[in-house]
Amino acid sequence: MGKGRLEAFSDGVMAIIITIMVLELKVPHGAEMGALRPLIPIFLSYLLSFVNVGIYWNNHHHLLQAVRQVNGRTLWANLHLLFWLSLIPFATAWMGENFTNLPVALYGVVLFMAAIAYFILTHALISHHGQDSTLATAVGRDWKGKVSLLIYAVAIPLSFVKSWLGCALYVLVAITWLIPDRRIEKALRQ
Amino acid sequence: MGKGRLEAFSDGVMAIIITIMVLELKVPHGAEMGALRPLIPIFLSYLLSFVNVGIYWNNHHHLLQAVRQVNGRTLWANLHLLFWLSLIPFATAWMGENFTNLPVALYGVVLFMAAIAYFILTHALISHHGQDSTLATAVGRDWKGKVSLLIYAVAIPLSFVKSWLGCALYVLVAITWLIPDRRIEKALRQ
Amino acid sequence: MGKGRLEAFSDGVMAIIITIMVLELKVPHGAEMGALRPLIPIFLSYLLSFVNVGIYWNNHHHLLQAVRQVNGRTLWANLHLLFWLSLIPFATAWMGENFTNLPVALYGVVLFMAAIAYFILTHALISHHGQDSTLATAVGRDWKGKVSLLIYAVAIPLSFVKSWLGCALYVLVAITWLIPDRRIEKALRQ
Amino acid sequence: MGKGRLEAFSDGVMAIIITIMVLELKVPHGAEMGALRPLIPIFLSYLLSFVNVGIYWNNHHHLLQAVRQVNGRTLWANLHLLFWLSLIPFATAWMGENFTNLPVALYGVVLFMAAIAYFILTHALISHHGQDSTLATAVGRDWKGKVSLLIYAVAIPLSFVKSWLGCALYVLVAITWLIPDRRIEKALRQ
C-alpha cells in the first residue's frame, strides 16, 4: 500500500491539533494591557505545545521520507501516535490554567506516551522494511529518542516536587529536537 | 474521474471529526486528581469513538486502494458515509455525559447508519468496477460487515435493558475490526 | 501553475466547514427523548447545509477535473467562493435556532452570494482556458446555475412573507443539484 | 526532500485558521435586524483577516511553485510562519470585540511578525536554492515585502493615537497584495 494517505491523514490531524490549541487563548473582556496578563501562562503552554507538535510533524515527515510502503499494522501504529497527540490540547489547556503539580505531570505523561507511540511506529516500519533498509540505517540506535523518553520519565515524578522543574525538562527535550535530525537526510543521500 | 480528491476530502473530514471530539474533554477548574474523575466516562467514550473513526479511516483507505476511478454516484455515497460519521462527535459527547439508555442507544444508531452507508459505498464502487473486478473479489461476501450490522441491530434495543450491555457490544465490534482486513491486501497482491 | 494546491486548500476549507457546523448541535443536559426535541430544527438546518456544501464540493470537483491550470485571478475567485461558504455555519446556526423571517432570508443571501461566486469562478476559469476549451463546452449555457440564482432571488423576499416558503425553495434547489451534473463527465469523455 | 507535505500541512493549517475565525461570529439570541448590529465590527475584522490569510496562502502557493526541494531549516522557517498566522484568530476576535488602541496595535504586531516570518522563510529557501535560482530572480529585491513591513511598523504606534488610523494602514497593505504578485509567474515562464 502507498504511504500517501497515511501522510495526508497525519498532516490533517496534526494541523488541526496545532490550530485548535489556540482556541484556549480565550478573548479577554477588557481591552487594556492587564486583560492580557492572565493569558501569559496559557500562551507559554501553547508555545511549548506548538513546538512539540511541530517536532512530531517534522520527525514524522523525515521518517516517512525513508519509507516506501505501509501495511495494516503501521496504519494502527500511526493512529496510536495520533491518539496521544490528540490529547495534547487538553493537557496544554489544563497546565496553562493551573501551573501546579498534577497538570504539569499529566502533560509529561501525554508527551511520554506520544514518544512511546513514535518509538512503536518507527519499529513497526523498520520490521516491515527490513533491518538492512535505508530506514533502519537512518534510525540507527536512536539514542536521542531513548534519552528523551528517559528525561520524560524523570520529569513526571519531579513535577510533584516542583512544577517548574518538570516543565523545565520538557523544554529541554524540545530544544534538543529543534536541531533537525540529520540521520535520515544523511541516509537518504547515500 | 480520479479518486484523489475523494480521498483527500474524506481524510480531511475524518481528521477533523477525530480531533474535535477531544474538545468535549473540557478543561476542569480544579487541579487535583478529583477534578479529573468526572472526565473518565467522557474519556472512555472518546477512546471508543477514536477507535471507531480510526477503523473507518483504515477500511476506507483499504477500499479505495482497490478502486481505480469514481463517478458522481460514488461521490454522493461517500458524502452519505461522512454525514453519519460527522454525527459521532455529538453521539459520543451525549453518551459520555449521560451513560443511560437513550444516549447509548443513539450512539448505536449512528454506528449502525454509518455501517449501512459504508455498505452502500462499497456496493456503489463494485457496481462501477464490475462483479469480476479486484474490488469485488476483495470484498467477497462481506461476512464481517454483515455480522457487524447484525450486532448493532441487537445492541440498540439491548441498550434500553442495560446501557452497559449495548456498549459492550459496540466495543466487541470495534475489537473485531482492529484486526486489519487482509482481504483487500491479499486480492491486490494477486 | 498547477491546480493541486487550489484543490487541496478548497478540500480543507470545505471539510472544516462541513464538520464545524455539527458543533452547533450542542449536547443536551437531559438524557430523555424530550431533551432531543429542541435539537430537531437545528439538525434539519445542519442536514440542509451539509447537502449544500456537499453539492459545492461535488461541483467544484467536477469543475476542476476539466481545468488544466490556474492563475492568480482564479485563486482569488476561488477564495471569494470559500469566503461565502465559510459563512454557511453561521447562517445555518442562526436559522436553526430561530426559524423566522430574517434568519431564513439571510441563509438565502449566503447561498445566493456563494452561487454568484461559483459563477464568477467558472467564468474566470473559462476565460483562462478559452471559449473552445473542454471546460467551456462542458459548462455550456449553464441553465441550471442561472435558474438556481433566480430561485434564490425569489426565495429571499418570500422568506419575509412565510419563512417555510423561502426554505422550501432552498430545499428545491438542493434537490435539483443532488442529481449529478453530467455535462462535465460527458465533455471529458469526448 | 520533496515539498509535498510542507505544502499539504501549510494548506491544512491555513484552511483551519481561516475557518475557525468564523466561530467568533457567535449566533445572536434575537432574530431581528438589531441582533446583527453588534456583529458588524466582528464581521469586518473577520473579512480583513480572511483576506490577509488568503494573501498568505496565495503568496505561499506562488513561492513554493518556484521551489524544488526543502530541508530541515525551511521546515522550521515554515512552522515559524504558521505560528504567527495561528495567532490571527485571537487577534481578530479581540480587535473585533474591542476596537480600541491596544487590540488594534496587537493585531498589527501579529501581522508584522507574520511578515517577518515570511521574509525569513523566503530567504531560507533562497539560500538553499542559490542566488542565481529561479526563486532568487523571482523574489528580486522584494520591495513590496519590505514596504509592507515598514507600513506595519508605522501603523502599530499610530494605533495608540487613533485606532482607525492603524487599521486603515492594515487595510492599505492588504489592498496592495490583492493585486497578485506576478514576479514568480513571470520568472517561471522564462
Image (cartoon, coloured by chain):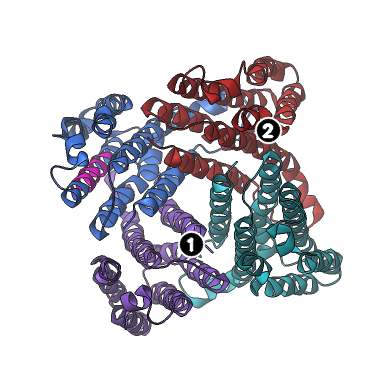
Chain colours: A red, B blue, C purple, D cyan
Q: Is residue C72 left or right of residue B146?
A: right
Residue name at image x 43 percent, y 62 percent: C93
Q: Secondary structure at mark 1?
A: loop
- The chain under label 1 reads C
Q: From what the image shows, is residue A31 above or below residue A136?
A: below
Residue name at image x 22 percent, y 40 percent: B135
Magenta range = B111-123
Q: Is residue D181 visible?
A: no
Q: From what the image shows, is residue B2 above or below residue A170?
A: below
Residue tagged by mark 2? A98
Q: Nearer the viewer, mark 1 or mark 2?
A: 1
Residue B7 % position (x, y)? 38, 48
Residue tagged by mark 1? C3
- The chain under label 2 reads A
Please state, as top left, top right, bottom left or bottom right, where the C terminus of chain B lies in the image: top left
Residue name at image x 56 percent, y 33 percent: A60
Q: Is residue A9 visible?
A: yes
Amino acid tagged 1? Lys
Amino acid tagged 2? Asn
Tell me the distance, in whole angstroms, between the alpha carbons under discs 1 and 2. 46 Å
Please state, as top left, top right, bottom left or bottom right, where the N terminus of chain B lies in the image: bottom left
Q: Is residue B123 left or right of residue C75?
A: left
